Image (spheres, rainbow, N blue to C red):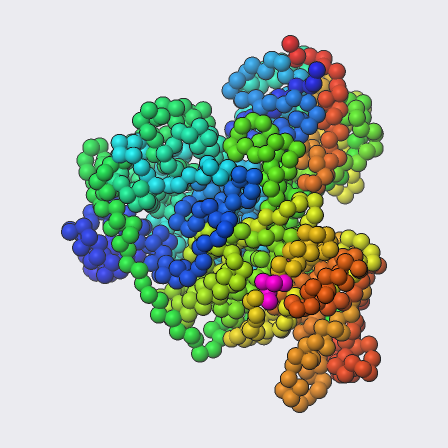
């Protein structure tokens, strides 16, 4: 055998790692042991390239019940209830087989949630694909969305929110991140540490087959290449029906207090589940692979140990409770088997028909994987190519606005999200597009069945939570540090818009190959930005996931940190909507908004190259603006709130008109503020900066901007409190047209406006609300299905 | 005495607790287990939405063989009230308790949408608290909801007044024949509909329009099933 074919290399281990394994064992590993090591020492399971960095993130908070390290983190939401939540990626499987890849991504994250004793109550997703011009991207997007819907809908968990964007760098390597929230009584959260020498190890759920063998190492921890079709068998196949029974059985077992601990089988299957349980419990486990219910004959011990067959759970049961546990499994028609027992050896011992086929010290498998320092190096310039130009030359402001509204990253996502059941569970107060964040009530839902978890009595809405998931690729690619701060701020902004206070955050860091210095630099800067933003907001990380090696022969994806935040709000009947819903409301732009055309949607449509830096921002000011907005929504001052995002202020205003009520807006106050902030000596050509300033005001992007509407007097009162964080009265709602002026009114007192008008570049925007609705609603459906 | 609702829980049911909650607003409600054929004391049997037994064969096709279904059929034969929602509707057509069949949506995919349906027949135990012409806003969510009946059967259904709910103009996304959203049997004690009334009983979660359907059931005289 040549070195190139050495089995450990084929399994993704380096020679040095293999030598270390031999040292830890005092001998060479056999095939079963090597397979187990290759998975547990993969990036996916060991976080060997990211663990050190993740230590920067804050993990303490007043509402935190369970932090990183468990199957999912959890926060306290009041009424004795807890929300467990986590986001996870299933990128590479989805790039290879999008329907099953995405479906099993949902299945996996659901299991993480009920493994901690929480009933899954909501799913959100964050998706990235290549541009929709590409047949491959249309296919991947359509099938991944169908897969998510298939699993979530079939299992009766609503998909309440999410995001989907299309950018060239995701063409080969799409991103499918799924987040799940679960509800539990605080005192019923369960950890996964195995305990009690002599206790039984029970595997229940689906039978074990050859599907998904080596998924964690082969798919998740290596770059995508041309022979990926041959990896298709490593993608697992999901069965939501099996999982729905598994949820009910698991929660019934926990409710009856029959389990000592519970763990789901995800990446690296039985190997990871069992060794993590043993490691946390500081015990050993004996596992008899011949007792595992199989769906295929003649599976090798290593195959049984590493299979990623879905819909399986592992639990530790005291001998006297075994009978009751198996009865619950029988009730739900689930396979079950006592496959081993807890020992005091601190070894994983694998037996096949009584013969010892693997013997590994637990710490060697779980803790001794070498941790690598990244070698970050900032690249000399922008590493991503400029996107193709999509916008005609010489468009006026109104035409530009409509082009943005109908563009793939701005147009309505309805065509995708209406493939998801968003109402099952009777908790959804705000559905997709009805507010900036999904809003869910937590009480009154067990209907007196005693079905876990029992909530407050019927009729009581119980605590109310809001949840949002957000990510950015392009802005993080432009500036990993400030871009990532923007991602955290946007997620917090979405919660603030519905009056929610953030309690905790989960993250999924989707990056390229960390062994390359510029990717390491992106990762390092991004995590630093996330840490700084979270400290400023006082929000802890409760857990998450890292997905590295997201690149193909075409290069790396845009670095894409995705964050999901859960917040609480006091009154489910006082939640700001995100469209104008009454005439004659005052409209204001609030917050420390510094719009910039850099890395925005307009720049993308114009085919401009990404910059290498985004504007600086004052985090304390942003945190204060979020607090002020949250309070103003809660006390009813702000009835409509929408954060300024893709396409800038004009696009956001147009989106506010989607409910059918128009507005008359004057952006002169913003243009003038931008003019004051700009160094007058910076550019000698008066017309150019004037045009630029106007475009910046209308289409510039950046964190911290909110379009709000409310009663005139109430907003006036808010303006005095909000002056420090930025507050500009910009208009009034009403009519069936969106009019935006203030940049060409010919008012000679406004030098900037006159100059822009004179340059002939821009004229007043006056667009029928019906046109806005039509373009926003129809564009994506047409593009995605063609 | 309050009307007693029994909601059958099959493996793969999704909306059984939502339905239980909705029924609890107007009467007593309990979950019934698919393996337990004893449904004595239940006035109204509800077959909830979801994907019973995974719906891997053909939607609603396997439930027919569930131990409880014989009792449900007997309850219906006795004149007892049976309501089938979404998957429950599919099950009732598969079991021959309702005419017609549900086919895949014309867009061939799962679609979740708030739809307006109008009450065509208010003279049934399911709609007696409504007025003819009432428009109800109710979510519909399914992959297989295109109601179909062959022309002769359709004529019979229509002329016998068995169509209870119709999608309002422009709302029939699944392509149902004659915009039919819900039908009953000739005896008018078995009713199936694709939209989910249990998700339209509270303004906080979007609409309370369908509460009238449950109130109708609670007000209906009990004609069978009850001991």
Q: Can residue A155 be seen?
A: yes
Task: Indicate left or right for A660 with A57 as reference.
Answer: right
Residue A294 sits in quarter: top left
Residue A262 belongs to the span the image colors magenta = no
Q: Residue furthest left?
A: A26
Q: Is A230 or A103 nearer to us in this picture?
A: A103
Q: Main secondary structure of the magenta part?
A: helix
> Which quarter of the image is occupied by the C terminus of chain A?
bottom right
Task: Indicate left or right for A577 with A38 as reference.
Answer: right
Magenta region: which residues?
A621-625
> Which quarter of the image is occupied by the N terminus of chain A?
bottom left
Residue A496, position in %: x, y?
63, 56
Residue A769, position in %: x, y?
79, 59
Q: Residue furthest top?
A: B227
Classify A287 as above or below B128.
below
Classify B94 as above or below B202.
above
Q: Can residue A132 be seen?
A: no
Q: Is A111 or B2 nearer to us in this picture?
A: B2
Q: Tell me how many marks there are.
A: 0
Q: Residue at x 46, y 30 (%)?
A: A255
Q: Residue at x 57, y 34 (%)?
A: A455
Q: Is B87 or A29 nearer to us in this picture?
A: A29
Q: Residue at x 73, y 31 (%)?
A: B211
Q: Residue at x 20, y 32 (%)?
A: A354
Residue A22, position in %: x, y?
18, 54
């Amino acid at each position: 055998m040549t070195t190139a074919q050495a089995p450990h290399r084929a399994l993704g281990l380096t020679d040095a790692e293999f030598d270390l394994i031999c040292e830890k064992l005092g001998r060479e590993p056999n095939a079963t042991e090597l397979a187990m090591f290759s998975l547990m020492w993969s990036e996916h399971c060991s976080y060997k390239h990211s663990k050190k960095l993740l230590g920067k993130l804050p993990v303490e908070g007043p509402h935190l019940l369970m932090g990183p390290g468990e199957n999912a983190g959890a926060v306290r939401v009041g009424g004795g209830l807890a929300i467990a939540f986590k986001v996870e990626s299933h990128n590479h499987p989805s790039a290879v087989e999008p329907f099953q890849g995405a479906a099993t991504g949902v299945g996996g994250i659901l299991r993480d949630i009920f493994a901690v004793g929480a009933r899954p109550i909501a799913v959100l997703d964050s998706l990235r694909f290549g541009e929709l011009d590409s047949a491959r991207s249309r296919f991947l997007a359509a099938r991944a969305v169908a897969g998510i819907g298939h699993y979530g809908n079939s299992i009766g968990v609503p998909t309440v929110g999410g995001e989907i964007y299309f950018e060239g760098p995701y063409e080969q390597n799409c991103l499918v991140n799924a987040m799940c929230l679960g509800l539990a009584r605080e005192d019923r959260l369960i950890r996964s540490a195995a305990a009690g020498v002599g206790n039984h190890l029970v595997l229940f759920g689906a039978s074990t087959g050859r599907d998904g063998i080596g998924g964690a190492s082969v798919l998740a921890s290596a770059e995508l290449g041309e022979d990926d079709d041959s990896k298709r068998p490593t993608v697992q196949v999901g069965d939501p029906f099996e999982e729905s029974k598994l949820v009910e059985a698991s929660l019934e077992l926990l409710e009856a207090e029959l389990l000592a601990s519970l763990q789901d089988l995800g990446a690296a299957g039985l190997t990871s589940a069992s060794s993590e349980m043993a490691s946390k419990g500081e015990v050993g486990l004996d596992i008899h692979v011949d007792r595992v219910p199989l769906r295929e004959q003649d599976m090798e011990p290593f195959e049984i140990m590493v299979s990623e067959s879905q819909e399986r759970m592992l639990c530790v049961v005291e001998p006297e409770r075994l009978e009751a546990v198996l009865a619950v499994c029988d009730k739900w028609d689930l396979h079950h088997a006592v496959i081993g027992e807890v020992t005091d050896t601190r070894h994983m011992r694998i037996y096949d028909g009584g013969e010892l086929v693997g013997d590994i010290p637990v710490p060697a498998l779980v803790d001794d994987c070498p941790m690598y320092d990244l070698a970050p190096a900032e690249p000399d310039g922008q590493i991503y190519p400029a996107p193709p130009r999509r916008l005609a030359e010489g468009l006026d402001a109104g035409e530009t606005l409509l082009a943005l509204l109908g563009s793939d990253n701005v147009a309505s996502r309805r065509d995708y999200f209406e493939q998801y059941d968003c109402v099952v569970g009777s908790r959804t107060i705000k559905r997709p597009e009805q507010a900036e964040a999904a809003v869910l009530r937590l009480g009154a839902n067990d209907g007196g069945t005693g079905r876990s978890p029992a909530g407050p009595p019927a009729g009581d809405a119980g605590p109310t939570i809001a949840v949002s998931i957000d990510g950015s690729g392009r802005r993080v690619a432009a500036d990993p540090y400030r871009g990532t701060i923007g991602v955290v701020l946007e997620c917090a902004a979405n919660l603030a818009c519905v009056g929610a206070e953030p309690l905790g955050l989960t993250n999924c860091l989707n990056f390229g190959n960390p062994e390359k210095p510029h990717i390491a630099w992106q990762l390092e800067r991004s995590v630093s930005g996330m840490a700084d933003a979270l400290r400023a907001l006082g929000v802890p990380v409760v857990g998450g996931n890292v997905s590295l090696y997201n690149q193909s022969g075409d290069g790396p994806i845009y670095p894409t940190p995705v964050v999901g935040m859960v917040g609480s709000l006091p009154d489910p009947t006082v939640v700001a909507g995100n469209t104008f819903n009454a005439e004659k409301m005052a409209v204001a732009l609030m917050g420390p908004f510094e719009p910039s055309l850099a890395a925005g949607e307009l720049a993308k449509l114009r085919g401009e190259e990404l910059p290498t830096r985004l504007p600086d921002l004052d985090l304390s000011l942003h945190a204060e603006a979020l607090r002020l907005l949250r309070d103003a929504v809660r006390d009813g001052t702000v009835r409509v709130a929408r954060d300024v995002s893709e396409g800038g202020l004009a696009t956001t205003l147009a989106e506010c008109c989607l409910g059918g009520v128009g507005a008359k807006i004057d952006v002169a106050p913003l243009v003038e503020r931008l003019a004051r902030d700009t160094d007058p000596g910076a550019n000698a050509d008066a017309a150019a900066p004037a045009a630029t300033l106007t475009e910046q005001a209308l289409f510039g992007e950046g964190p911290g901007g909110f379009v709000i509407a409310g009663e005139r007097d109430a907003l006036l009162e808010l303006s005095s409190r909000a002056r420090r964080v930025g507050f500009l009265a910009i208009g009034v709602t009403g009519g069936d047209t969106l009019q935006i002026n203030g940049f060409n009114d010919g008012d000679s007192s406004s030098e900037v406006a006159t100059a822009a008008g004179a340059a002939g570049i821009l004229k007043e925007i006056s667009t029928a609300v019906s046109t806005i609705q039509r373009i926003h609603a129809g564009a994506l459906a047409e593009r995605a299905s063609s | 005495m309050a009307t007693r609702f029994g909601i059958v829980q099959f493996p793969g049911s999704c909306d059984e607790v939502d339905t239980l909650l909705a029924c609890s607003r107007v009467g007593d409600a309990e979950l019934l287990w698919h393996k337990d054929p004893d449904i004595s004391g239940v006035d109204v049997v509800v077959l909830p939405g979801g994907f019973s037994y995974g719906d891997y064969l053909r939607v609603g096709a396997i439930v027919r063989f569930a131990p409880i279904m014989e009792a449900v059929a007997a309850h219906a034969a006795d004149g007892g009230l049976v309501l089938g929602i979404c998957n429950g509707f599919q099950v009732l057509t598969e079991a021959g308790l309702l005419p017609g069949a549900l086919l895949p949506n014309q867009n061939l995919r799962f679609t979740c949408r708030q739809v307006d349906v109008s009450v065509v027949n208010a003279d049934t135990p399911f709609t007696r608290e409504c007025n003819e012409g009432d428009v109800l806003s109710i979510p519909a969510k399914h992959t297989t909801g295109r109601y179909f009946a062959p022309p002769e059967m359709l004529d019979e259904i229509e002329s016998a007044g068995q169509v209870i709910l119709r999608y309002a103009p422009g709302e029939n996304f699944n392509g149902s024949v004659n915009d039919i959203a819900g039908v009953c049997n000739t005896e008018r004690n078995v009713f199936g509909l694709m939209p989910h009334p249990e998700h339209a009983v509270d303004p906080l979660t979007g609409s309370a329009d369908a509460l009238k359907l449950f109130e109708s059931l609670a007000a209906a005289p009990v004609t069978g099933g009850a001991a």
